[in-house]
Image (cartoon, coloured by chain):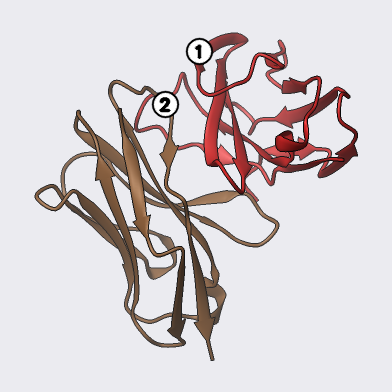
Amino acid sequence: DSGVTQTPKHLITATGQRVTLRCSPRSGDLSVYWYQQSLDQGLQFLIQYYNGEERAKGNILERFSAQQFPDLHSELNLSSLELGDSALYFCASSPRAGGPVETQYFGPGTRLLVL
Amino acid sequence: AQSVTQLGSHVSVSEGALVLLRCNYSSSVPPYLFWYVQYPNQGLQLLLKYTTGATLVKGINGFEAEFKKSETSFHLTKPSAHMSDAAEYFCAVSGETSGSRLTFGEGTQLTVNP
């Protein structure tokens, strides 16, 4: 158990809908990262927040957005969902602002199925 | 830009045999390299990482990896496979220019046969 929690574990929804995925980082960690794992794209970095501010951005679609709240939990909002958005979404956290050598601790993921 | 290539999407070994999972990287800056393991229905867990210094890195569960700059490789090994090692393994790279962004390989599914 990494100490990172994600809810819900599974989510089934329809195309065109909007969902929110939630992540609670390890106690004391200030950075939160979101990754998408899909069959065709593999594991891809989406976005990082550090202490409430966006820190780095990866291959995140404009239909997706994220935020980190004062209590450091984070939410990933996915809107206008398409079939291709079906994937496993991971959240990870790290103690500080990140950096190339800082270890990221991954949660168990939220499996999203868009029908 | 940085990338990693994992050779072999599926590797099968017998229990007690050597495990060798291959990872080659491409990076325009000195790379930092990671191996993560993903057990079924779980998140990724860090096995080991190379930053600087000693090129042979020891990790958890008896795994180790050697950074070979001349071969741009960071292969993962374990002398004797155990049934509990069955999982998917990911190699990842970061660097000073990529910040905290991890770029992952495609993953290698390891099967351990009794």
Residue found at the very far left of the displayed protein: B70
Query: For the point 43% across and 82% down, which residue is it?
Result: B13
Q: Residue A13: x and y, percent?
A: 90, 36
* B90 or A49: nearer the viewer: B90
Look at the picture and state if A36 lies above or below B5.
Answer: above
Camera-side residue of B85 and A95 = B85
Give the number of the disc on residue B100: 2
Label 1 in the same subunit as label 2: no
Q: Where on the picture, by quarter, is residue A77?
A: top right
Q: Is residue B42 left or right of residue A83?
A: left
Q: Position of residue A44 (x, y in %)?
A: 53, 35
Relative to A19, B69 lies left or right: left
Q: Which residue is mark 1?
A: A55
Which three-letter amino acid code belongs to the residue tagged 1?
Answer: Arg
Q: Secondary structure at mark 2?
A: loop
Residue B72: x and y in percent read: 18, 48
Relative height, residue A107 to residue A30 (above, below) = below
The chain identifier of the residue carrying mark 2 reads B
Image colour assigned to chain A: red
Residue appearing at x 87%, y 40% in the figure: A115
Instruction: Label 1, secondary structure: give it.
Output: strand
Residue A11 - label: none
Q: Residue furthest bottom?
A: B114
Q: In the image, residue B69 lies at what x, y percent?
A: 13, 47
Instruction: Please say if the residues under marks 1 and 2 sit with CB atoms less than 8 Å apart.
Output: yes
Q: Chain of mark 1?
A: A
Query: How would you rate the neighbour count of disc 1 (Cα within 10 Å): few for under 14, some for 14-19, many for 20 or more?
Result: some
The span from disc 1 to disc 2 (Cα, nearest Å) is: 9 Å
Residue at x-position 71% and y-position 10%: A70
The colour of chain B is brown
The residue type indicated by label 2 comes to: Ser
**Residue under the image location 63 percent in, 19 percent down:** A61
